């Protein structure tokens, strides 16, 4: 298994979406690249993210980037849907240089690469979010109305074979 950390705005929808993808083994809501060590209080520079464990024989980092670009506005800085602020920035973070190189190549190969605001950085710190944020949309489907990801996109891969 491989692990990357994907930021795509509010983590509730991002976790729900990535959890449904073929080759994704496990997801966990969290925060990446901030300065604090607890999920309490303010975000201390963190990006809301989802820890994504995946089987690289079934899904690549390039595939994960393609999926990410289905659910975000890649040109938006610190904003996705109604959520605004640095914690809602988009990005892919990893402790593995191969993952970072693949994500950067994905962006570099796009004709719109100069407009893309998606970060690709080494993971410097990760904090798991509180239990109330784990699998939030599965436990509280009424919160879908708050999510920036359209339901048609959210459910696009729901019946995929893992």
Image (spheres, rainbow, N blue to C red):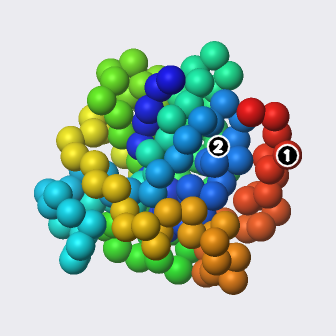
Residue 153 appears in which quarter of the rendering? bottom right
Q: Which residue is mark 1?
A: 159
At x 60%, y 35%, the residue is 25
Q: Residue furthest right?
A: 159
Q: Is residue 39 above or below residue 82?
A: above
SS of the residue at dot 1?
loop
> In the rendered view of the protein, which quadrant contains the C terminus?
top right
Please identify, in this view, whether the residue under mark 1 or under mark 2 is nearer the observer: 1
Q: Position of residue 58 (x, y in %)?
A: 68, 22
The residue at 51%/35% (across/down) is: 53
Q: Quadrant of residue 129?
A: bottom left
Q: Measured from the top left, where is residue 74 in percent x and y?
A: 53, 53
Q: Which residue is mark 2?
A: 67
Residue 62: percent from left, percent from top: 57, 28
The answer to whether residue 121 is above or below residue 16 is above
Decide: few, some or many residues near mark 1? Use Cα within 10 Å; few <14, some 14-19, many ≥20: few
Q: Secondary structure at mark 2?
A: helix
Mark carried by residue 46: none
Q: Determine whether 160 is above or below 32 in the image.
A: above
Residue at the image position 50 percent from the left and 57 percent from the top = 8
Q: Are marks 1 and 2 in contact (CB under 8 Å)?
A: no
Of the pair 73 and 159, the residue shown nearer to us:
159
Is residue 110 visible from the viewing direction of this image? Answer: no
Residue drawn at point x = 58 percent, y = 20 percent: 56
């Amino acid at each position: 298994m491989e692990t990357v950390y994907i930021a795509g705005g509010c983590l509730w929808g991002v976790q729900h979406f990535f959890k449904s993808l073929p080759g994704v083994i496990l997801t966990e809501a969290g925060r990446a690249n901030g300065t604090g060590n607890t999920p309490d209080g303010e975000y201390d520079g963190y990006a809301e993210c989802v820890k994504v464990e995946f089987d690289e024989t079934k899904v690549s980092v390039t595939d994960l980037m393609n999926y990410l670009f289905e659910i975000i506005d890649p040109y938006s800085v610190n904003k996705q849907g109604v959520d605004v602020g640095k914690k809602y920035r988009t990005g892919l973070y990893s402790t593995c240089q191969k993952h970072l190189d693949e994500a950067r190549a994905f962006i570099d190969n796009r004709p719109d690469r100069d407009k893309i605001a998606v970060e690709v950085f080494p993971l410097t710190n990760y904090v798991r979010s509180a239990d109330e944020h784990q699998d939030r949309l599965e436990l509280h489907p009424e919160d879908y109305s708050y999510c920036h990801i359209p339901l048609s996109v959210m459910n696009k891969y729901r019946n995929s074979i893992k």
